[in-house]
Amino acid sequence: MADISGETQLVHLQRRYKAARWNTGAFERAWKSDAEPGAVEGLVNSCASTRMMLLEAVACQRGRGPIHDVSVWRLPNSQAFFFVSGMTIDADGAPNAYSPDDTGLDELANAGTPAHWDGIVTDPGGNPLVQNDGDPSPGYYISCTSLSDKTKKFDDQTAYVDASNIPYVVLPREVADRGGARLGDFAFVMNLRNGRSSFAIYADIGTLGEGSVALAKALGIRSDARRGGQTDGILYLLFAGSGNLRPRTNGEIQTEGERLLVDHAGNMRDLSSCIEDDGAVASGKF
């Protein structure tokens, strides 16, 4: 969980959710309602329409759940943008993510196909490379992320962001480009169901509403890349332009994330008041 210094509005939200004090709030009614799937997203989006600038409406790619529409909003007077969605689990970059016998953290099919591998490093002929003795997980494929350490060789497993150790988020290229986000930018992610939160880094290009194994664990979400995830109620806040296009340590992600959240305290006030408005109407499309 993020250890955030300063009395920002999102800290207040986190404490309210952790304390389970939302018995009469519209937000709690939304995410607890079986009759209104996606109502969390609707509440944020309908409220945001009067307080934030619409960035773009996108269709969530089909992962392990249904296709649905997610609206992406920019905070006023800021380069930061946010959306609320579910989370599927990404194991890319973990040394034991994929194996020839399909016993890795994730299903081999999620790394692409022999004609087009996406999550596995290949040789010039398109053949997947296997880790050798001395590598983190000998016998497993070299699993990659879009963000990598350019000072290391492309076939060095440690050049990539390890999903099992580093909390990271995934964005579609179109959303990242429209929002001005670059690989290596920082993010704040909150599980609105339980109040748990984490800072993260934008490390992979893929589908909307996807996070690393480590991020899922930090948020109290089932982190199994094959069967884990959560269908809704995850708030993603991206600080566009905040990174340096390089992987970061957990310590750096925490330190930079705290600084950015405090710097955006004024912008968060609008988001916080929106979420806490009991009169907001949960009428978004899902």
Image (tube, rainbow, N blue to C red):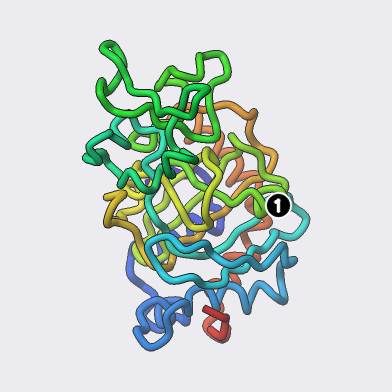
In this figure, which residue is indicated by the disc labeled 1?
A: 179
Q: Is residue 174 left or right of residue 215?
A: right
Question: Badge 1 local density, few (<14 within 10 Å), some, or many (20+)?
Answer: many
Up the image or down, 181 lies above or below 133; here it is below
Residue 17 or 60: which is nearer the viewer? Answer: 60
Up the image or down, 230 lies above or below 180; here it is below
Q: Is residue 254 left or right of residue 142?
A: right
Residue 42 x/y as whole percent:
55, 78
Q: Is residue 8 left or right of residue 114?
A: right
**Residue shown at the point (57%, 62%) measured from the top left:** 83
Up the image or down, 128 lies above or below 113; here it is above
**Residue shown at the point (57%, 19%) measured from the top left:** 150
Residue 86 or 235: which is nearer the viewer? Answer: 86
**Residue shown at the point (73%, 53%) measured from the top left:** 178
- Residue type highlighted by circle 1: Gly
Residue 251 x/y as whole percent:
44, 28
Residue 18 or 145: which is nearer the viewer? Answer: 145
**Residue shown at the point (54%, 64%) measured from the top left:** 60
Up the image or down, 39 lies above or below 1; here it is below
Residue 118 x/y as whole percent:
48, 40
Residue 66 x/y as whole percent:
43, 71
Secondary structure under tag 1 reads helix
